[in-house]
Amino acid sequence: MISFLRKHKTLSMIAILIVLFAGWFLFRPEKLFINQRVNEAAPFVANDARKPIYTGLLNGKLHETSGLATVYREPDGTMTLRLSNFHTSNGPDVHVVLVAAADPGLQSTTLGTTLASLEIGMLKGNEGDQDYRLPMQTDLNRYNTVVIYCERFRAVFGSANLEAF
């Protein structure tokens, strides 16, 4: 094996570079050190027409996660999820999803957790205040837990059980 590598130095170097690039692409280690802050202003609605209907505190699972998750009913009937004073670890392919509180994947403390979830969107930033429009006809009686979830590693960063406001 060593003699093969010595004879084919160029080929060996190319193979090593490909492996290093693939490792970087999969794990994105620079995200461990870079925070992405988002500060979306809360929309102003006259006459307090924007009503909070559900709320819950975010708690960490595999990563330290904190903040407040609140679902608002907008004047036009749509619903918006707002993450306030939010903080979690940065990572590759992190999403905001809704799941049922009884989902067994929420109890897992390891990677590889599969959730029966409703996709809300890609996480805009790992810190700050941010809004996500919920899909029409979202059943918050069924999907009553907000989860910060890494799709690539199937890891639950943190979650919040939503309770009626």
Image (cartoon, rainbow, N blue to C red):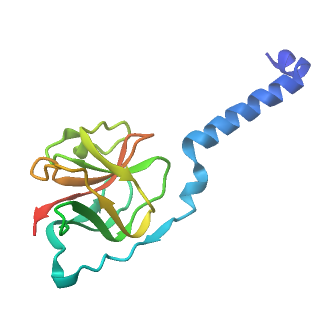
Which percent across, then down, holds residue 106? 24, 46
Relative vertical location of residue 163 with respect to residue 52 in this rendering, above or below: above
Give the farthest residue toward the front.
Answer: 76
Residue 105 lies in quadrant? top left
Question: Could you tell whether 158 is left or right of 4 in the image?
Answer: left
Residue at the location (50% across, 48% down)? Answer: 92
Q: Name the quadrant of the N terminus.
A: top right
Give the farthest residue toward the bottom.
Answer: 47
Question: Could you tell whether 31 is left or right of 94 in the image?
Answer: right
Which percent across, then down, holds residue 14? 80, 29
Question: Could you tell whether 157 is left or right of 13 in the image?
Answer: left
Of the pair 159 and 75, the residue shown nearer to us? 75
Residue at the location (17% across, 69% down)? Answer: 75
Count of marks, rendered view? 0
Residue 26 lies in quadrant? top right
Residue at the location (13% across, 53% down)? Answer: 140
Which percent across, then down, holds residue 69? 25, 65
Give the farthest residue toward the right.
Answer: 7
Relative vertical location of residue 63 with respect to residue 154 in this rendering, above or below: below
Of the pair 118 and 28, the residue shown nearer to us? 118
Residue 27 lies in quadrant? top right
Relative vertical location of residue 5 with respect to residue 13 in this rendering, above or below: above
Which percent across, then down, holds residue 4? 84, 15
Q: Name the quadrant of the C terminus.
A: bottom left
